[in-house]
Image (cartoon, helix red, strand yellow):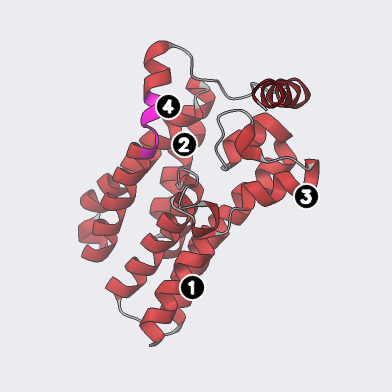
């Protein structure tokens, strides 16, 4: 029962759509109707600005970390801890509160890795920061950082990286890459937005309402 409860709580924690909630509370908008339509921090940044984006990033990261800590503190084994962390990521990407849709899971996965291996998480986050600065593409940085985690774990396995952690990193990285397929297509077309680009909320909102009126 404790294991089942931990897994359920981990999923539900991950499923909390903080991006949607922050959009509603700060601007009274549904973030899914603006920019890329994603509920993650990058779309919140383009739509609402750095303050709300940082809040969403911290909250999305915290829920992944919390899932790992809950499972660990209740004395569950490594595989159960990994399952809890993975379910928090899947909760974010397939949220029961959003009809099993959601974000890309990058920040939540970062929180999970922080809970499992802070050093590897720090290196992955460093890679993300450097690539954002160099390319100004958050998607490129996110994909590369996600893939770097299982690579690091495989290379550092002699440094007491448990096998279950590597398995989690591989599954999470694959899921993040799959969720970024639309971004990869936009990159190929040259239409992927760069870091710092803004979304005109008023103009896009007016266009959406106009479309609704025409089709209503």
Give the number of the mark in front: 3 or 2.
3
The residues bearing labels 4 and 2 have C-alpha atoms spaced at a distance of: 16 Å
Q: Earlier in the sequence, mark 1 or mark 4?
A: 1
Give the number of the mark in front: 4 or 2.
4
* C-beta proximity under 8 Å, tags 1 and 3: no
Residue 147, how many percent across, how many down?
31, 40
The quarter in which the C terminus is drawn is top right
Point 76% across, 23% down: residue: 206
* C-beta proximity under 8 Å, tags 1 and 4: no
In the image, residue 164 above or below residue 89: below
Q: Which residue bears the numbered disc 4?
A: 183
Q: Earlier in the sequence, mark 1 or mark 2?
A: 1
Farthest bottom residue in view: 1
Q: Any mark on residue 25, and which?
A: 3
Magenta region, residue range:
179-184
Magenta stretch holds residue 181: yes
Residue 13, how many percent across, how many down?
53, 65
Front in this rendered view, residue 88 or 196: 88
Q: Any mark on residue 9, and which?
A: 1
Mark 3: few, some, or many residues within 10 Å (few <14, many ≥20)?
Answer: few
Secondary structure of the residue carrying numbered label 1:
helix
Secondary structure of the residue carrying numbered label 2:
helix
Q: Earlier in the sequence, mark 4 or mark 2?
A: 2
* C-beta proximity under 8 Å, tags 1 and 2: no
* Main secondary structure found in the magenta portion: helix
Give the number of the mark in front: 3 or 4.
3
Count of numbered labels shown in the rendering: 4
Secondary structure of the residue carrying numbered label 3:
helix
The residues bearing labels 1 and 3 have C-alpha atoms spaced at a distance of: 24 Å
Rendered image quadrant of residue 43? top right
Q: Which residue bears the numbered disc 2?
A: 128
Mark 1: few, some, or many residues within 10 Å (few <14, many ≥20)?
Answer: many
């Amino acid at each position: 029962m404790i294991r089942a409860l931990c897994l359920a709580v981990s999923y539900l924690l991950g499923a909390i759509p903080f991006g949607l909630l922050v959009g509603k509370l700060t601007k009274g908008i549904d973030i899914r109707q603006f920019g890329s339509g994603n509920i993650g921090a990058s779309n919140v940044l383009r739509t609402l600005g750095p303050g709300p984006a940082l809040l969403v990033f911290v909250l999305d990261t915290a829920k992944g970390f919390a899932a790992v800590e809950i499972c660990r503190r209740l004395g569950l084994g490594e595989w159960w801890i990994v399952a809890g962390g993975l379910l928090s990521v899947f909760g974010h990407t397939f949220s029961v509160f959003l009809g099993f849709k959601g974000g890309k899971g990058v920040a939540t996965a970062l929180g999970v890795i922080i809970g499992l291996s802070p050093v590897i998480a720090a290196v992955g986050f460093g890679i993300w920061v450097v690539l954002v600065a160099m390319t100004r593409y958050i998607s490129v940085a996110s994909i590369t950082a996600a893939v770097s985690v299982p690579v690091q774990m495989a290379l550092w396995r002699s440094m007491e990286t448990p096998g279950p952690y590597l398995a989690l990193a591989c599954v999470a990285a694959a899921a993040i890459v799959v969720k970024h397929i639309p971004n990869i297509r936009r990159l190929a077309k040259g239409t992927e937005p760069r870091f710092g680009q803004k979304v005109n909320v008023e103009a896009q909102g007016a266009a959406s309402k106009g479309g609704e009126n025409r089709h209503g």
